[in-house]
Image (cartoon, rainbow, N blue to C red):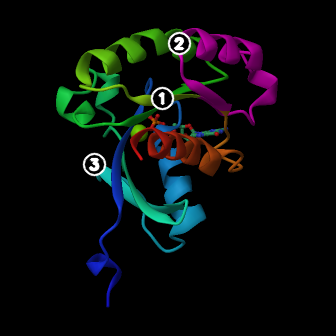
Amino acid sequence: HSEEEQIEDYLFKIVLIGDSAVGKSTLLARFARDEFYPNSKSTIGVEFQSQKMEINGKEVKAQIWDTAGQERFRGVTSAYYRGAVGALLVYDVSRRQTFDSIGRWLNELQTHSDMNVVTILVGNKFDLKDSREVTTTEGKDLAEAQGPFFIETSALDLSNVSVAFQTVVGEIYNILS
Ligand code: GDP
Ligand code: MG
């Protein structure tokens, strides 16, 4: 039988949010392509990408939503957030402005989502060591104040990319199961 015929035990909607060019689409493409589906195409123009994962012997499908770049102009719509149970709040460690926006993104998430969303604060572009503008400690402190988990990633060299997604999915699973 085909993979489509299998019914997964859980389906979790997860949204990627954060300023333009912080690396949201690259993180998703890396997670999807390099870690799980070596032959899948890039995510351009696709609203979400689904990834099957196994947690405690259960099949979990993470439906990960990416913006089509609309955050640059008018922010994302409420439809984007609807039904989300997890979120990756992404900033770029080499651009402080993107870190300063996190509070606003968190507010928007809380305003539009109808439940408690499991969030992880993601400091991406960790590989840009010479142009870092936000320290690891600053990221950790913000995460502690706001509640979300925290991780630094590099979508370029793949550091911590799958861990970031797995942390969110694992925590959602713990809460809902
Ligand atoms: P989005 O607008 O948040 O979806 O950002 P993109 O995924 O389009 O990435 C914006 C730019 O940052 C692209 O040129 C990426 O190649 C680059 N980029 C993404 N992640 C990383 C990273 O971890 N390190 C470095 N050095 N560049 C990255
Ligand atoms: Mg994008």
Please give the label number shown on residue 119.
1
Residue nearer the viewer, 170 or 162: 170
Residue 140 lies in what quarter of the image? top right
- Going by the numbered disc 2, the residue's amino acid type is Gln
Spot occupied by residue 123 in the image (x, y as percentages of width and height)? 63, 27
Over which residues does the magenta segment extend?
A: 122-151
Residue 52 lies in what quarter of the image? bottom left
Camera-near label (1 vs 3) is: 1
The residue at 59%/41% (across/down) is 164
Q: Is residue 89 visible?
A: no
The answer to whether mark 3 and mark 2 are in CB contact below 8 A is no
The answer to whether mark 2 and mark 1 are in CB contact below 8 A is yes
> Could you tell me which secondary element the residue under label 3 belongs to?
loop
Residue identifier under label 3: 47
Which image quadrant: the N terminus? Answer: bottom left
Rendered position, 121 above or below 62: above
Spot occupied by residue 145 in the image (x, y as percentages of width and height)? 58, 8
The residue at 35%/80% (across/down) is 3
Camera-near label (3 vs 2) is: 2
Spot occupied by residue 147 in the image (x, y as percentages of width and height)? 54, 17
Residue 87 lies in what quarter of the image? top left
The residue at 36%/12% (across/down) is 107
**Among the two numbered marks 2 and 1 on one chain, the one whose residue lies closer to the N terminus:** 1
Residue identifier under label 2: 146
- Going by the numbered disc 1, the residue's amino acid type is Thr
